[in-house]
């Protein structure tokens, strides 16, 4: 006896407004920063403007994935297109790591041959960057814990805000001491911190893209809980996998002896949704044990 329950007790998060504001703010900042770099001849500002342009691309990709995740299922995509949010998070993690690598490489080169930078101009533009990137990160703060795609966007923006803050400190230091090497030194330090965070995002997104059990779910604990339910004498073929960054599915065969299978299934699926956020549940009830292992 097989039964599938699909229910979601959490309303889907509408990230459209957040992405719209983030893309608009960052696009405007890229234009301002690029123009300032062109007028002053500051390669640092031009390079950062190019980096922020990749951020806009990343936000657009994450936004597109969030839109795809809301599309209805089709005969060709029976689970819908929610997995696009996982791929977007993976792409964002890779983009962050590539950007960190490029900045670190350039900073190492400049340590041996520091380039004079207009400290005041860099500081003022970076201050604007702090405001833009911090504001953009805050747009995704409330959604980042339950949505890896939103987490990727949040980390991207938060990392850029940190970079802008470090640039301000470096600019102040350069104006006070005249030490041009502060600019690449701070860039390297910040890049290492960003790399650690991005590596965690990459690991989680890659794990989910390979149908791994979401990190926040304890498979052993769920198996133990299922085996303790009334009438359950054993289980096997327990599978838990992500459908998107916000939806998780579970399928399991239960050896069960009871009188009311519908009531049992309703109770178990409701509990899995409420306690673990697993809203897509398929239970296969069997009357006799199977030779397969759990």
Image: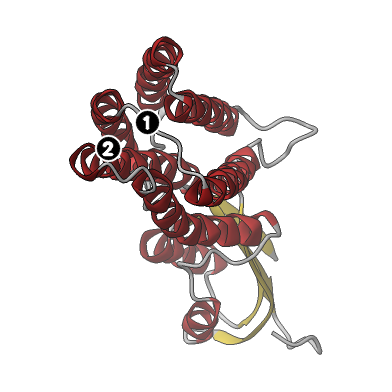
| Front label number (1 vs 2) | 1
For this view, does 257 lie left or right of residue 180? Answer: right
Q: Residues within 10 Å of mark 2 (few under 14, many from 20)?
A: many
Q: Is residue 285 above or below residue 41?
A: below
The quadrant the N terminus occupies is bottom right
Circle on res. 181: none
Question: Mark 1 near mark 2, Cβ–Cβ under 8 Å?
Answer: yes
For this view, does 223 lie left or right of residue 290? Answer: left
The residue that disc 1 covers is 117
**Cα gap from disc 1 to disc 2, whole angstroms:** 8 Å
The residue that disc 2 covers is 171
Which element type, helix, strand or loop, lies under badge 1? loop
The picture quadrant where one finds residue 189 is bottom left
At horizontal 45% and vertical 43% (from top left) the residue drawn is 114
Residue 96 lies, in percent from the top left, at: 54, 45
At horizontal 32% and vertical 40% (from top left) the residue drawn is 167
């Amino acid at each position: 006896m097989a039964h599938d329950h699909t229910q979601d007790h959490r309303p889907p998060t509408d990230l459209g407004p957040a992405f719209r504001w983030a893309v608009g703010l960052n696009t405007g900042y890229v234009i301002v920063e690029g123009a300032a770099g062109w007028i002053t001849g500051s390669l640092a500002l031009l390079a950062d403007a190019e980096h922020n342009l990749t951020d806009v691309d990343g936000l657009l990709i994450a936004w597109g994935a969030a839109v795809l995740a809301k599309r209805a299922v089709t005969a060709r995509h029976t689970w819908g297109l929610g997995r696009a949010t996982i791929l977007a998070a993976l792409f964002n993690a890779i983009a962050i790591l590539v950007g960190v690598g490029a900045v670190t490489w350039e900073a190492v080169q400049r340590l041996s041959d520091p380039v004079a930078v207009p400290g005041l101009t860099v500081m003022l533009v970076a201050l604007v960057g702090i405001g833009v990137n911090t504001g953009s990160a805050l747009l995704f703060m409330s959604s980042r814990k339950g949505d890896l795609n939103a987490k990727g966007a949040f980390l991207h923006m938060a990392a850029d805000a940190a970079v802008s803050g470090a640039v301000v400190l470096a600019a102040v230091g350069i104006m006070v001491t005249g030490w041009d090497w502060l600019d690449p030194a701070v860039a390297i330090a910040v890049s290492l911190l960003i790399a650690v965070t991005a590596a965690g995002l990459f690991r989680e997104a890659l794990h989910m893209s390979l149908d791994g059990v979401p990190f926040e779910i304890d498979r052993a604990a769920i198996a133990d809980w299922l085996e303790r339910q009334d009438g359950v004498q054993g289980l096997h073929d327990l599978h838990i996998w992500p459908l998107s960054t916000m939806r998780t599915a579970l399928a399991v065969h239960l050896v069960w002896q009871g009188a009311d299978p519908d009531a049992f299934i309703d109770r178990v699926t409701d509990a899995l949704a409420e306690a673990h956020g697993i809203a897509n549940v398929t239970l296969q009830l069997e009357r006799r044990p199977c030779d397969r292992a759990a």
